[in-house]
Image (cartoon, helix red, strand yellow):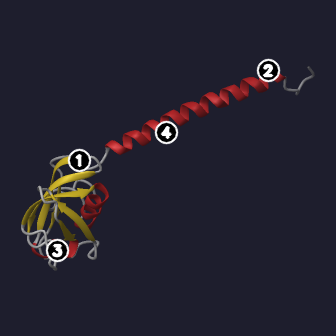
Amino acid sequence: MRGGETGIGEIVTAIAGSIVVAAVLLVGALRMAGAAHAFGPVPGDIVAFAPDTTPEEADLRVAAETWSPHHLLCLLEAKEMAAAGGSLIVEARDGEGYHVHWAGGRSSGGSADCGQSRDLVVRRGDLERLAGAAGGFGALGTNLIP
């Protein structure tokens, strides 16, 4: 070989090295994606709505299912929940949903109100949206996740 020319062996080595690096990156990305699924609210987390405040997403409405043999639907409306104040406490994770306990004023302005105290099942995304409307997870004034 003359100076400046690349041999076939060097090309094969470079390609093989690139494949190994790509495989390692792919495995790492897949592990991170799997680990990301494990993050999210955990039992004991709280979403607190301060009374007489306007939540960040005032028009947010979330359907919830009562955690009882009858599985009735009711609404969680951020604006109503903040009017008199109240909180959702995460009690358990159930697949993609969460068992939460609502305690406070009305949860909805209409007939779909969950009541002042109710055990509910809420989807993860909906719980995270409610937390965002309230200012994060955490007790009033001590939001842990903004």
Residue under pointer 2: 9
118 vs 81, nearest the viewer: 118
**Label 2 Cα crowd, 10 Å radius (few <14 / some 14-19 / many 20+):** few
Q: Is residue 119 left or right of residue 22?
A: left
Mark 4 → mark 2, Cα distance in angstroms: 30 Å
The mark that comes first in sequence, 3 or 2, is: 2
Q: Residue at x 72, y 29 (%)?
A: 15
Q: Is residue 77 above or below residue 3?
A: below
The mark that comes first in sequence, 4 or 3, is: 4
**Label 1 Cα crowd, 10 Å radius (few <14 / some 14-19 / many 20+):** few
Residue type highlighted by circle 3: Ala
Q: Which mark is residue 112?
A: 3
| Location of the C terminus (image quadrant) | bottom left
Mark 1 → mark 3, Cα distance in angstroms: 23 Å
Q: Is residue 76 above or below residue 15?
A: below
Q: Which mark is residue 102?
A: none
Q: Which mark is residue 29?
A: 4
70 vs 140, nearest the viewer: 70
The mark that comes first in sequence, 4 or 2, is: 2
Assess whether mark 1 and mark 4 are in contact (beta carbons under 8 angstroms).
no
Residue type highlighted by circle 1: Asp
Q: Is residue 55 left or right of residue 103?
A: right
Q: Residue 108's x, y, as percent?
A: 16, 75
Q: Residue at x 24, y 61 (%)?
A: 131
Give the structural element (helix, strand or loop) at label 2: helix
46 vs 63, nearest the viewer: 63
- The residue mark sitting in front, 4 or 1, is 1
Residue furthest out toward the front: 70
